[in-house]
Amino acid sequence: MLRTRALSAVILVPPLVIALVIGVPAVAAVLVLVALLGGSEVFRLLRQAGYPALSLFGTALAVGLVLEAALSPGAEKGLLLVAVGFVLAGVGAFGRPDPRDGLVVWVATVFGAVYVGLIAFVLHLANAAPSVPPGAPLHVLSAAQGWILLLVLGVWSFDTGAYLVGRQIGRHKFLTHISPSKSVEGVVGGLVATTVVTCVMLLALGQNPLGGVALGPLLGLAAQAGDLAESMLKRAAGAKDSGTLIPGHGGILDRIDSFLFAGPVVALYVLALVR
């Protein structure tokens, strides 16, 4: 299993690095594909959990949220797209003979689309990112590249820290009805790791590194919550993985679940506190 996971990482990492090097358009293209595949997975899981939905429409809405963030930056337009999708999903559910089934279809369609569409906040972060000062260690990167890198390394460091610490000294389990392997010690280890990495990245981007004392734990907790949210969805569906797309890793949702919650948190930090 460990060998399979390592081989999968070798396949996954280069496209991400290449996309970051090329710039935001390449990242957007990758995220459109992620939304397309993620939409397929989430609506299959919802169906297995007993929540039918308008799968094609919901997936299209998720992809639309990513495209909107890439082509027309601005939160108000994203909210408008969600509102239009909300209305159309409701209209699409009118055809169900039982109004209770129609309500389930309506709610599940909007939920699935918005859940996967949260990946668009990676692009909202890129659009809101402040420029990297000339004297900063990472001044060779654009603002978008630098802050997306902070998000990626922050999530990866939390996952790595939580796994290593939890495996070595994890004793106190929590939320075992959702994910039996999670431990309090693992979460603490992940939070320490992501806080250190976030402080270093902020310094490298020309920001006050002390901001990482706040952003690091928030990013780490959001990453953990994203992982648990997807685990809850899989538990409800009776599925071990969200899919079989990536050997050793499951589906695409199994790889991006932390980013779905962490992206909005980092974007909010930038919009609220960074000038």
Image: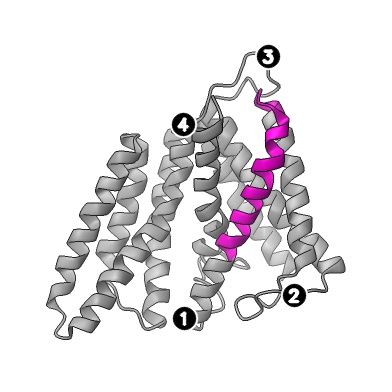
Identity of the residue drawn at 41% across and 43% down: 29
Q: How is the image coloured?
A: one colour
Instruction: Please tell me which of labels 1 and 2 falls first in the chain.
Output: 2
Amino acid, disc 4: Ala
Q: Which residue is mark 3?
A: 135
Q: Is residue 75 left or right of residue 119?
A: left
Q: Nearer the viewer, mark 4 or mark 3?
A: 4
Question: In the image, is residue 209 above or below residue 31?
Answer: above
Residue 37 visible in this rendered orientation of the protein: no
Identity of the residue drawn at 37% across and 83% down: 50
**Residue 210 included in the magenta stretch of the image:** yes
Give x and y (percent) for residue 204: 70, 27
Q: Nearer the viewer, mark 2 or mark 3?
A: 2
Task: Measure how far apart labels 4 and 3 are at the Cα level.
Answer: 21 Å
Q: Nearer the viewer, mark 1 or mark 2?
A: 2
Q: Which residues are magenta?
A: 203-227
Give x and y (percent) for residue 248: 63, 68
Q: Which residue is mark 2?
A: 173
Instruction: Please tell me which of labels 4 and 1 falls first in the chain.
Output: 4
